[in-house]
Image (cartoon, rainbow, N blue to C red):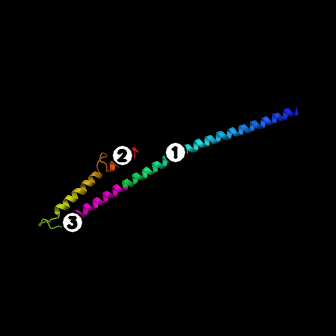
Amino acid sequence: MASNLEHHKLTRFFFTISVFITATSVLVVYTTIMATHYGIKKDDIQTHLVKSQDWWNDYQAHKLREKIFQVEIDNLNNTLNQLPISAGHPHQGIYVKTISKYQSYLSKLHANKSVTDSFANLADKAKTE
C-alpha cells in the first residue's frame, strides 16, 4: 500500500510539473507572438513618423522657395522703379524677364496637384501616404 501511495504521489508530482511546463510554454509562445506584433507595429509607426518628417521638410523647403522668389521679385521691382523712366536702361529687359521667370516659379508652387513641385501636389502625396 505504501508503494501504491508513493506511486500516486510521484504521478501527481510529474503531472503538476508537466502542467507547469505546458503553461509556461504557452505563455512563452504568447509573449513571443505579442512581441513580434508590437515590433511590427513599432516599425510601422516609425516609418510613418519618418515619412511625415520628410513631408514636413519638403513643405518647409517649398515655403522657403516661395519666400525667396517673392523677395527676388520685390527686389527687382524696386530696382526697376529706381531706373530713370525717360532713358531706356540696357538692363531693363533683363529685369523684366527675370521677374517673369520668378513669377512663373511662384505660379508653379501655387498650381494644382498635377504640377510636380506645387503645394497641392505635396499635400496630395502626404494624404495618399
Q: Does 62 sit left or right of 14 as displayed?
A: left
Nearer to me, 43 or 92: 43
**Residue in view at x 86 percent, y 33 percent:** 3
Q: Determine crowd level at label 3: few under 14, some 14-19, many 20+ residues with C-alpha closer than 10 A.
A: few
Question: Which secondary structure lies at badge 2?
Answer: helix
Label 3 to label 1, Cα distance in Å? Answer: 57 Å
Q: Nearer the viewer, mark 3 or mark 1?
A: 1
Can you identify the residue that label 2 sits on? 124
For residue 63, above or below residue 17: below
Q: Position of residue 2 (x, y in %)?
A: 87, 34
For disc 2, the neighbor class at 10 Å (few under 14, some 14 to 19, many from 20) is some
Whichever of labels 1 and 2 marks the residue nearer the N terminus, that label is 1
Q: Which mark is residue 41?
A: 1
Q: Quadrant of the C terminus?
A: top left
From the top left corner, tell me how far across and down residue 11 is, in percent.
78, 34
The amino acid sitting under disc 3 is Thr
Q: Quadrant of residue 13?
A: top right
Secondary element at tag 3: helix
Whole-percent x and y of residue 46? 48, 49
Q: Is residue 98 above or below residue 35?
A: below
Q: Is 5 in the magenta?
A: no
Name the residue rendered at 40%, 53% in the picture. 56
In the current view of this chain or complex, which residue is farthest to the left?
86
Marks 3 and 2 sit apart, C-alpha to C-alpha, by 38 Å
In depth, the one of 129 and 22 nearer the eye is 22
The residue sitting at the right extreme is: 1
Where is mark 3, residue-wise?
Answer: 79
**111 lies left or right of 3:** left
Badge 3 or badge 1: first in the primary sequence: 1
